[in-house]
Amino acid sequence: MTDLAPGERMIWQGRPEGGARPDLSKPGEIVFGLAFIAFSMFWMDKAREDGPIWLAGLPFLAVGLKLAFWRAWGPRLRSKFARYTLTNRRALVEIRWPLVGSVRQEMTVTPSTIVDIDGPAPETITLTQALSGPRGTTRESLRLERLAEGQRVLNLIRDIQKGAA
């Protein structure tokens, strides 16, 4: 999973705790997504008689599916396929989606990295850095979600920040 630079060593690997509940915190978005699905399916059914024009409804169907189902089930799927790694320099998140491939996010941990932990066990650790560039300051963040051993990982990140890892 991880290509280590010279002098870099892995200090922790883990994955999110399974069994994430569906996120039903925005029921309006889910209901809107279901309505979007119903409308796009109705439109595609009626447009099917006019040749391939019905295919134009597929993007709308995809948006409805994302609104209705990804909000609720996305965190559960993410926790199933995610892997976390801490080295003595970086934090990495890799999600290996079936059929799609891997999505990888990494962040170099420095003393200026802001580290937050929230929630009861399983905890979520968020690492944030302010990056200055030609367009001003932007924020980059990385989340280690649903950690059963969140306090231990937090202590390891603090050690990396101190240079003790």
Image (cartoon, rainbow, N blue to C red):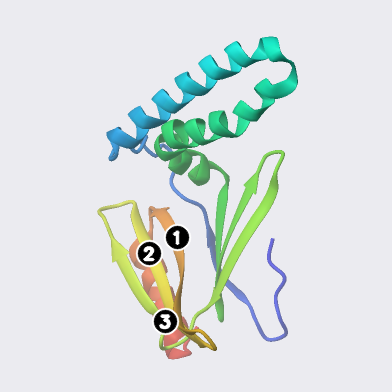
The outermost residue toward the front is: 50
- Residue at horizontal 28 percent and vertical 40 percent from the top: 25
Mark yes or no: residue 24 visible: no
- Residue at horizontal 48 percent and vertical 90 percent from the top: 163
**What residue is pinned by disc 2?**
125
Say what amino acid the circle numbered 3 marks.
Thr
Q: Earlier in the sequence, mark 2 or mark 3?
A: 3
The x, y position of residue 159, in whole percent, is 42, 82
- Provide the secondary structure element on which disc 1 rests: strand
Mark yes or no: residue 31 visible: yes
Are the residues flagged by discs 2 and 1 in contact, CB closer than 8 Å?
yes
The x, y position of residue 66, in whole percent, is 49, 36
Height in image: 114 above or below 84?
A: below
Give me the C-alpha separation between circle 2 and circle 1: 5 Å
Q: Badge 1 local density, few (<14 within 10 Å), some, or many (20+)? A: many
The outermost residue toward the left is: 120
- Residue at horizontal 58 percent and vertical 69 percent from the top: 106
**What residue is pinned by disc 3?**
113
Q: Earlier in the sequence, mark 2 or mark 1?
A: 2
Say what amino acid the circle numbered 1 marks.
Leu
Say what amino acid the circle numbered 2 marks.
Ile
Q: Badge 3 local density, few (<14 within 10 Å), some, or many (20+)? A: some
Height in image: 160 above or below 16?
A: below
**What residue is pinned by disc 1?**
144
Height in image: 122 above or below 151?
A: above
